[in-house]
Amino acid sequence: NFILTQPHSVSESPGKTVTISCTGSSGSIANNYVQWYQQRPGSAPTTVIYEDNQRPSGVPDRFSGSIDRSSDSASLTISGLKTEDEADYYCQSYGSSNQRVFGGGTKLTVL
Amino acid sequence: EVQLVESGGGLVKPGGSLRLSCAVSGFSVNTYNLNWVRQAPGKGLEWVAFISSSGLYIFYEDSVKGRFTISRDHAKNSLSLQMDSLRAEDTGVYYCATENPWNWGQGTLVTVSS
């Protein structure tokens, strides 16, 4: 089974930059799009990055996505951190049997 | 504007059944691929089921195969998830979501408990 691994938690200060990684277990990240979702406490997820590095309208350009095919990993970078960015972040991609696969989630603390 | 509104959640005993609905607006249900995703209390997101925009392709997460059925109702412009033989581990908030782009509903809570 295809697995996406994320750090359990990250923390950074307001105004700084943070990067959240998402590593695939079997080479699929290099061959499939990756999405990133933000979920604030008590709320539904929202999409912040789709198709590796595209931002939906309304998502600030402080959010960016990238892929490193050599390490089969994806990254979400948030610059100019704001307290409102504090949330759980999930990566998502696709397995070999058409499964949609989510990473375990990363809790971002802005302190 | 794309909107998805889930309903049908509630408390059900182990072994029971429940049918979730997702009313969509701003698009037709045969425009996008559609998914059900769930989240157990305090846990992460877990994909449950997929139906393609054409309706020709349907996929399920292994633990729900044979118990859950995803379908679309064109007349009602809605997505459904029929859940049978429910287990305690099926407890959680169930979200419907479009794919490409991923738009999410607000979720409906399913609790499986005796």
Image (tube, helix red, strand yellow):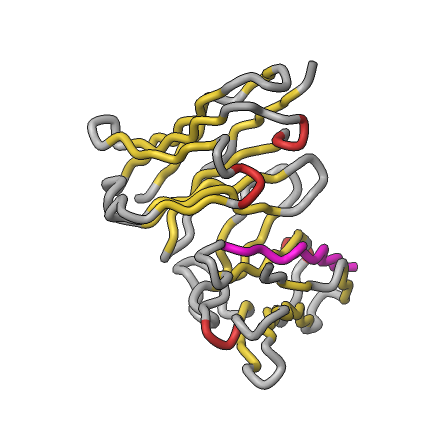
Residue B24 vs residue B19, the one in the foreground: B19
Identified at 79% across, 59% down, the residue is: A111
Identified at 42% across, 31% down, the residue is: B81
Relative placement, left or right, of B109 versus A57 is right
Pick the quarter of the image with the N terminus of chain B: top left
Question: Is there any visible trace of residue B26 in the rendered image?
Answer: yes
* Secondary structure predominantly adopted by residues drawn in magenta: strand
Res. B49 image quadrant: top left
Q: Position of residue B87 (x, y in %)?
A: 63, 26
Identified at 68% across, 73% down, the residue is: A17
Identified at 53% across, 37% down, the residue is: B64
Q: Residue furthest left?
A: B75
Q: Position of residue B97 (x, y in %)?
A: 42, 44
Q: Where is residue A68 in the image (x, y as percent from the top left)?
A: 57, 81
Q: Which residue lies furthest to the front in this view?
A: B66
Q: Where is residue A25 in the image (x, y as percent from the top left)?
A: 63, 69
Q: How many labels does the image show?
A: 0
Task: Give the residues drawn in magenta, as a range.
Answer: A100-111
Relative placement, left or right, of B70 versus A65 is left
Vertical placement of A40 versus B87: above or below? below
Question: Is there any visible trace of residue B104 in the rendered image?
Answer: no
Res. A18 image quadrant: bottom right
Q: Let me know if residue A37 is in the magenta part.
A: no
Q: Let me know if residue A105 is in the magenta part.
A: yes
Residue A38 vs residue B57, the one in the foreground: B57
Vertical placement of B57 versus A58: above or below? above
Relative placement, left or right, of A94 versus B1 is right
